[in-house]
DNA sequence: GAAAAACATTGATCTGGATCAAAAAATCAG
DNA sequence: CTGATTTTTTGATCCAGATCAATGTTTTTC
């Protein structure tokens, strides 16, 4: 159950076995059914999740109720509503399992406790923040500098597995275009 | 010269006077003329800047040469091309002074050296990354969930000083709309 | 302080992608 | 396996905001 997470951590920071066991001991298992939601707008993010199997979808909800996908978390990815996890303020993005999903999670309190007691966890968190920032910026850059076709081509190039694994509807939503628009632009490439 | 930076640091982390002097000793002064550029696409980011007076504009350049503003850094703000600063890869955003601007800066090498030797600097960097991430995410959310008028109203509410201080052209560019579109939507509010 | 340059406004037209609608294809539940 | 739901495709129409153009206004420069 902890094997994938252990590899994830040791791939990113230098950590001895004792420290690793301490870290892992704070993670608990959770299985979600398809379409199950794990947080609610208005509450703060209380956990950070690691995906062993399955896939999470994180999305914003517009005022009119429309959803815009912010990110997917596939196997061996960490996921939380990081802005809320950081600030403690209510979250503005919903996380839902798009298929049956096996997770392990750590509570926000335990996460911050580890930051205080394990210097290597501070390094881990630094790494996590750096990657989250870089990914976020790439996505922002793509939205403000590229049209729908360019965004799709970039996705095909950088994350082909996403296009293979997800329905057109979800891919379109990730690109922030309608599924009709995606269908049309695919037929033109 | 270091007064504003010293306050910026002590407002964010717990640091004794000796540590503070060590940190400040790595910063050097630099004054930019209006429209002077401080980095070039293709090079990695080698410095982090702190604005004492003036204003920096950080922008992406599209394939067709059009510019899209990513961020402004006014007085008492840190600024770098953080994705490049983190990864060491060539930067994808240009930083230009939009007026005569007085800066102090630290080199990337010295910044990382401080991370190794001063635990409080690691905390400082964590804080910096967290805020950068949160701001980035807010901006991404605004772009994917709001139309031009809503983005403008949000800017007016959250950063009225930006609307006051900057030309319509720059405000429009920050909102990723044409200056004509901004002029029209303002007349309708 | 006058000429030049940059910026702001307003009008006309264009366009990428949204929305609405309906049919075809795929997936799911019992 | 079969009917029901969901997804995908294609067509018709619409709209927010872009672009082009012209004029007025402010700022810069010498």
Image (cartoon, coloured by chain):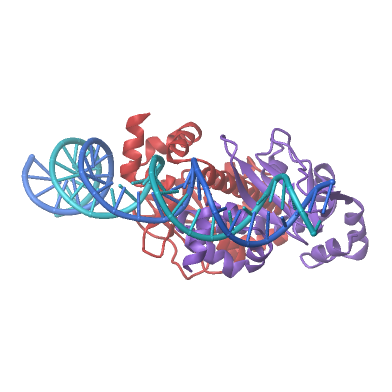
Chain colours: A purple, B red, C blue, D cyan
Residue found at the far top of this picture: B189
Snapshot quadrant of residue A4: bottom right
Side (left or right) of B49 relative to B126: left
**Percent position of residue B44, x then y:** 52, 68
Q: Residue at x 89, y 51 (%)?
A: A29
Task: Please provide percent x and percent y for residue C1.
Answer: 8, 40
Marks counted in the figure total 0
Where does residue C22 sit, x and y in percent of width and height? 52, 48
Q: Residue at x 53, y 62 (%)?
A: A152
Q: Let me know if residue B54 appears in the view.
A: yes
Residue B105 seen in render:
no
Residue drawn at point x = 92 percent, y = 53 percent: A25
Is A17 located above or below residue A56 in the figure? below
Out of A187 and B86, give the one closest to the viewer: A187
Q: Where is residue C29 in the image (x, y as percent from the top left)?
A: 80, 48
Quarter holding the N terminus of chain A is: bottom right
A112 is higher (above) or lower (below) than B184: below
- Name the foreground residue: B58 vs B25: B58
């Amino acid at each position: 159950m902890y094997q994938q997470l252990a590899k994830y951590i040791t791939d990113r920071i230098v950590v001895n076995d004792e420290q690793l066991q301490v870290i892992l001991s704070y993670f608990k298992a959770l299985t979600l059914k398809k379409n199950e939601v794990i947080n609610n707008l208005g509450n703060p993010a209380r956990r950070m999740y690691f995906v062993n199997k399955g896939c999470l979808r994180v999305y914003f909800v517009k005022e009119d109720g429309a959803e815009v996908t912010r990110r997917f978390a596939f196997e061996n990815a960490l996921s939380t509503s990081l802005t809320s996890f950081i600030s403690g303020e209510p979250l503005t993005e919903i996380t839902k399992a798009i298929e049956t999903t096996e997770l392990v999670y750590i509570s926000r309190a335990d996460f911050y406790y580890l930051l205080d007691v394990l210097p290597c966890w501070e390094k881990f968190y630094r790494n996590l923040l750096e990657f989250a920032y870089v990914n976020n910026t790439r996505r922002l850059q793509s939205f403000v500098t590229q049209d729908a076709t360019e965004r799709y081509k970039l996705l095909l190039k950088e994350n082909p597995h996403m296009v293979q694994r997800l329905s057109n509807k979800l891919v379109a939503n990730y690109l922030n275009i309608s599924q009709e628009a995606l269908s049309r632009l695919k037929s033109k490439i």
